[in-house]
Amino acid sequence: MKITKATWEKRNFGMDVYEIFLDKKDLRNFDEVFQEIKDQGFQKAYVVIKMPVGNLKALHALEDDGYRFLETQLYLNDYFQPKDLELNIIRNETIRDNLTIEQIPKIREKWEEIIQKITPGTFDTDRVSLDPILGKEIACKRYQNWCRDLFDDLNSSMHVRKINGEIYGFGIDVVDKTGSIAGVLGAIFPSYRTTFLGISWIDNCAGSVKTAVSSNNPSATKIHQHNGRIIYKMRYVLRKKYD
């Protein structure tokens, strides 16, 4: 078990935030681990638990203690080249002629121009926006601050997606120690949410990116799978607000 005080989240949630990661070994000794969680004595805090899927006894014990299920996190990576990818590209050929990708310079003011386009509802399938005790306003603030934090990562980059010269979405990638690109954050802005833009987005980065999506966002999951990505890991996510 690993317990982290997520100090960066206090500015967003207005309370102390802790993240607890459980692994399969913890679930084999869950009674002891569960007691250790209780012994932390959390007060006026928002506590998130992330755990491997499949142990409903542990999941239900946490729910009985006041934790609430929020989502299953789905981790995907590239696995195969789908046979109908070429057909998909041809079908969207006219649209694709009007799509462009533009890298944003690593200048804080330039990043901030894009960050300010994030509004409540830009992210509406994530666990923060869907949590009844948090909501879209807090989610908006959280994602804006997350982008600002990512700017300080030397290995991060931001790009925008355009259609007919108008920005319809953005993405932030981070290169890890192995040279792999992690698609950390990205969104299509609400007024441009159409299936073809989502498909075109994923087509463009196929074969290069690992990413994660929420089980609350089945549309994104389907698009990733359509483009040859498979789920290689899943985690339950629960939370409890301590008074």
Image: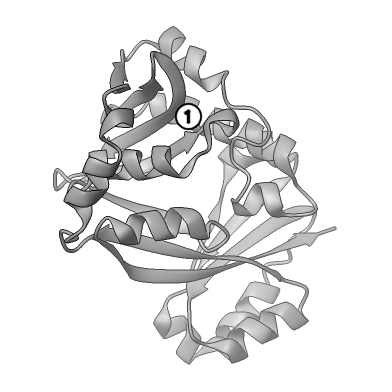
Q: Is residue 42 above or below residue 169?
A: below
Write the residue at 42% across / 70% down.
234
Residue 55 is situated, as x and y percent measured from the top left of the image, at 52, 87
Write the residue at 59% across / 51% down.
126
Q: Is residue 47 above or below residue 235?
A: above
Q: Is residue 50 above or below residue 18?
A: below
What residue would you read off at disc 1? 147
Residue 99 appears in the figure: yes
Residue 1 appears in the figure: no
Observer-nearest of 173 and 204: 204
Quadrant of the rendered structure where residue 71 is? Answer: bottom right
The amino acid on which the numbered mark 1 sits, given as a three-letter code, is: Cys
Write the residue at 77% across / 59% down.
241
Q: Secondary structure at mark 1?
A: helix
Question: Dividing the image into 4 quarters, which one contains the C terminus?
Answer: bottom right
Observer-nearest of 223 and 170: 223
Residue 171 is situated, as x and y percent measured from the top left of the image, at 39, 32
Write the residue at 19% across / 46% down.
208
Residue 21 is situated, as x and y percent measured from the top left of the image, at 49, 66
Q: Viewed as shown, does residue 23 lie left or right of 178?
A: right
Q: Viewed as shown, does residue 70 lie left or right of 198?
A: right
Observer-nearest of 205 and 134: 205
Q: Residue furthest right?
A: 243
